[in-house]
Image: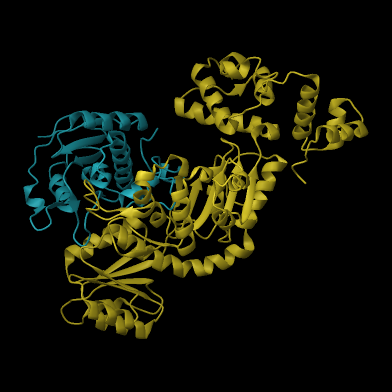
Chain colours: A cyan, B yellow
Amino acid sequence: MVSGIHTNDRINVVPVKFSNNSFLKKIINELNRRFHSDISPLAMDLDIGETFSEERAQYFSTQIIASFSSLTSDVSGKVLLITEVDLFVPVLTFVFGEAQLNGKHSIVSVCRLHEEFYSGISDDDLLFQRTMKEVLHELGHCFGLIHCKDWDCVMHSSQGIEEVDIKGNFYCKTCARSVIGLK
Amino acid sequence: MNNKKEKILVVDDEKIVRESLYHWFIEEGYQVETAEDGETALRKFDKGKFDLLLVDMKMPGMSGLELLSKVKEIDKDTIVILITAFASVPTAIKALKDGAYDYVTKPVDPDELEHLVKKALEQKSLRVENEALKGSIDEIIKPDNLIGESLQMKKIYELIHTVAPTDTTVMIRGESGTGKELVAKAIHINSKRKYFPIIPVNCGALAESILESELFGHEKGAFTGAQFKRKGKFEMADGGTIFLDEIGSVTPKMQVELLRVIESKQFSRVGGNQLIKSDFRVIIATNESLEDLVKQGKFREDLYYRLNVFSIFIPPLRERAGDIPVLAFYFLNNFCTAMNKNIKNISPEAMEFLCRYDWPGNVRELENAIERAVVVGKGEMIKVDDLPFHVSSSAVANNDGDKSMTAMEKKHISRVLNENNWNISRSALELEIDRVTLYNKINKYGLRNPYK
């Protein structure tokens, strides 16, 4: 089920209900541009149907992470799940992503990052920029970072799409010190 | 960077809710404890121990409302936000009457919860911080790329220092590329609003058709394709600053809208009836003379007077040539890091070109020139030939078309004066003329000392 060479500063990118391969490659290329670490796609066959809430028509992100955690104990480095489905945690209406603080796993959903859901106009470049911000943000949590007060830092909290757009797409100097493998 | 230290107590009988909120608040940087019922919460509670309690309304045993009144008896300053699965107006009124800060319904919009908690806590902590801020700024915090040690720039830093802690509307004037947005940012990050965002709006780029939605936001379903709601720029600036760039290019319709929202600080999202209040500071920028636009009837006089409260002028780069070397090295260092190149220096000839060029595009043009030089440069030094053709060509010697001796002399004297921060003795010495002659030439050419 799990394949590939595993190193400590590796970032494994796992598609979960995500079929856009060229977009996935673009994310991996961008991570390679920003990290010295080995960035590799990792195919894992796991049904996340149990994490689906009929009532909310969304998937419970904490449970998805828990399901993958049991399968990735022999995988070194970080495990970044990328999905197209809409995510939630109880209490909140949705989440863009979730991460294990100072841990191994994180998940990012591109579902609510699509511009057409807000303005009706599709914008692939904007989708990619937003996705990279959320990817870097959730990875930052895995490296132990909490939310940053600097709006130019990608670790600034972004609970709405507007905040995703206005925050920066790099780690500030202070946050960058905690991210292992960053160029 | 994060230095939040506020303590939050989450009280909810559902484990999954407690855990979700616990992790969510930890990522936000708060210190968090949880309790599964009112009794446990009270055992953990003590005067001054928690800044905020997030309490589920319906729990077995003690209800959220009962817990609220007991907590308020012990510490009336503790902020309590109640959460419930079902919204009910009478309960909400009772909760607010009993001293709850607010009341939210499950599931909560994460943005709403974050904003609510942040505003509640920061209003409390800013009361103390603002007092300190008013009296004790010795030096302003500058954005990394607001650079320059010329007297003109030092004067700008002083103005930023003066106006930042107030809520005054600021008008920033200057040619394109002089760094008006950086000055706006410096004002924002030195104000009490620094923990909230500064929202830039490029007024020149806004199409009238999307104007309302951009500025005021829209509700879910407001138009085809609007599956999710979106906040507008003025709502995003709540607590922070709105930066209206290129204000001179706004259409008459937008001028009316701007005046209305700036005065009332309230609006509705497109497709919604709810009146939204937003507490924002206004900073505007222009490279045009608004006075001329008012005279021509292109800019509303009432809006002009509403905006023209405190003005900061950024001089063009050619009038502060002394800043060119430090800016050039700053950009060189940045581009070398980004492109992984090892260019450490700028040749004296190339630097001379940079300092003598007129920079009609100002700092932005200098940045582009250095970027280009880093791309094409080989070795450890930028040479004249690495600079863009139009910079390293005859444009340097005379790029304004007027080739007369009088024009050349005026320009030369102006440059020397600026390089010497208008020190007359030093400038006269460099020009090899006496001080009286220099004064006469200053009068003859109508040169103006920017430091006076």
Instruction: Give the quadrant of residue B310.
Output: bottom right
Would you place residue B40 above or below residue B193 in this image? below
Q: Farthest residue in the front direction? A: B297
How many discs appear?
A: 0
Which of B267/B369 is in front?
B267
Q: Residue at horizontal 53%, vertical 65%?
A: B129
Q: Residue at horizontal 7%, vertical 43%?
A: A47
Q: Residue at horizontal 23%, vertical 40%?
A: A80
Image coordinates for residue B183, horizontal then vertical, percent: 57, 46
Image coordinates for residue B222, horizontal then vertical, percent: 25, 53
Residue A107 seen by the camera: no
Position of B79 with respect to B178 (left or right) is left
Instruction: Give the quadrant of residue B379.
Output: top right
Position of A53 with respect to B336 (left or right) is left
Image coordinates for residue B177, horizontal then vertical, percent: 56, 35
Would you place residue B311 above or below residue B73 in this image? above
Residue B144 seen by the camera: yes
Which of B252/B269 is in front?
B252
Position of B439 with respect to B185 (left or right) is right
Q: Residue at horizontal 27%, vertical 34%?
A: A124
Image coordinates for residue B337, horizontal then vertical, percent: 48, 29
Which of B198/B220 is in front?
B220
